[in-house]
Amino acid sequence: MKGTIGFDKRSRRFYVRWYDNKTRKTIRIWFYKGIKLETRTLADKLLKSMQGDVENGVFILEKYTQNQTDVVPYLKRWLESVKGNLSPATYKDYRNSIDNHLVPFFKAKLVQLHEIQYDVINELMSKIPRSGKGKLNVIYCLRACLDYAWRSKRIQAMPAFPKKKDYNIVEPVIKWLPSDRQEAVLSSIPVEHQPIFWWLKYHLRRPSEAIALLKEDFDGEVFMVQRGFSARQVHNRTKTGEIHAVPSVSDFMKWIELERAKQLRCGIISPYFFVNPTSRKTDKRYTLDFLEKTWKKACKLCGENIGLYYGTKHSTASQMVNEKHYSIDEVQLAGDWKRRESVTKYAKVEVSARKALLEGKIIKFATISPLKADKNNQ
């Protein structure tokens, strides 16, 4: 079996002599989990641990030589190996979690990759100086890394993780605009820029997806939403990684004609579906900063104070539930949400409706079909 135990007479300490196949050199290892090998028993324990890792196919030399833990080097190697599969924003968030939270913790906590269990994760969570959602993001990064390690057979099993309620996350109340107020804001935007904002209202999509939409993504009836912007870069996938076939709403057709007329009038040739004539970019595409500033100015004119995302997607979804009385399932279908829980946050009954319920009046919510709701609104 590979490896032998030696004794240094000068320091009166034991060490493990190990041949490294990569460097083709024999190295001496003097610590086991940060403890000096002052006894033969401890040296023997280290050697058996190393030999056990070899037999199980999970041996990493850095586990015994770098910082006395294999977690830190593995986290860094893992991030670089999956970088190509992550959006720029996700990569940036993972890098921040690793550099600012995971590495400092595991440099002080001398555990090995396979020793990360529920109690260690709980200790990590308690030491992350972030709010509940911030803690969850760091733990999610660690979980993604350990899942990769498990699939790569570096660890034999995935540890248990805290439940979402353990993070004490307070879900924010959804801010939204009723239809008339939302349309007032949209109408206050300069007409040449209105098409992209109306697209966001009608189609329940993200601003980054609207910016990245190409002319080739629209066949006259359906928008194929398959890319977005992340960390100011075009990313050839949506936030969830899915491709969404989004039917064009009939009321939006006049805005398509206006957008095309604008591009023809300005002589703009661009692969992007929506273009900004005032942009300094050669492709004349919109930027998220421009959309947010334009939306903010329109809100100020109307006496509103709500962000772009809440004022478009959140508001339209909330209107479907609270004004048109669509069911949660119908709204989920309209917005192509993968999880039903993502839609329930929009089901916030208005004060007038709650008052009627408290007074014993019968109000039917979420059982009216979209067709019937449209007839009632005519």
Image (tube, rainbow, N blue to C red):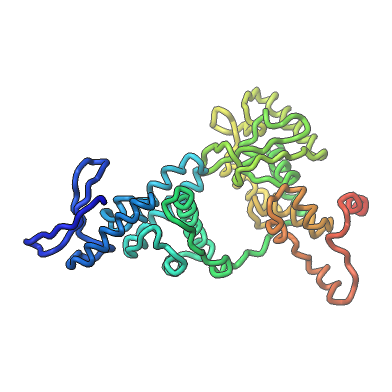
Q: Residue at x 54, y 32 (%)?
A: 280
58 sits left or right of 219 in the view: left
Quadrant of the rendered image containing residue 227: top right
Q: Residue at x 46, y 43 (%)?
A: 82
- Residue 322: x, y in percent? 80, 60
Q: Is residue 312 visible?
A: no
Q: Nearer the viewer, residue 291 or 13?
A: 13
Q: In the image, is residue 170 above or below residue 238? A: below
Q: Position of residue 78 (x, y in %)?
A: 42, 47
The residue closer to the viewer here, 108 or 111, is 111
In the rendered image, residue 79, in percent from the top left (x then y), is placed at 43, 47
Query: Please, which residue is most extreme toward the front here?
Result: 1
Q: State the residue at coordinates (76%, 54%).
A: 181
Q: Is residue 100 visible?
A: yes
* Side of 134 relative to 36 (left or right): right
336 above or below 176?
above
Extreme residue toward the left, this view: 10
Position of 57 with respect to 205 (left or right) is left
From what the image shows, is residue 161 above or below residue 376? below
Q: How many marks?
A: 0
- 139 and 145: which one is in front? 145
Q: Residue furthest bottom?
A: 359
Q: Is residue 33 left or right of residue 358?
A: left
Nearer to us in this view, 162 or 330: 162
Q: Tell me which residue sits at (72%, 36%) in the image.
A: 223
Instruction: Identify the image quadrant of residue 344.
Output: bottom right
Q: Position of residue 315 (x, y in %)?
A: 72, 54
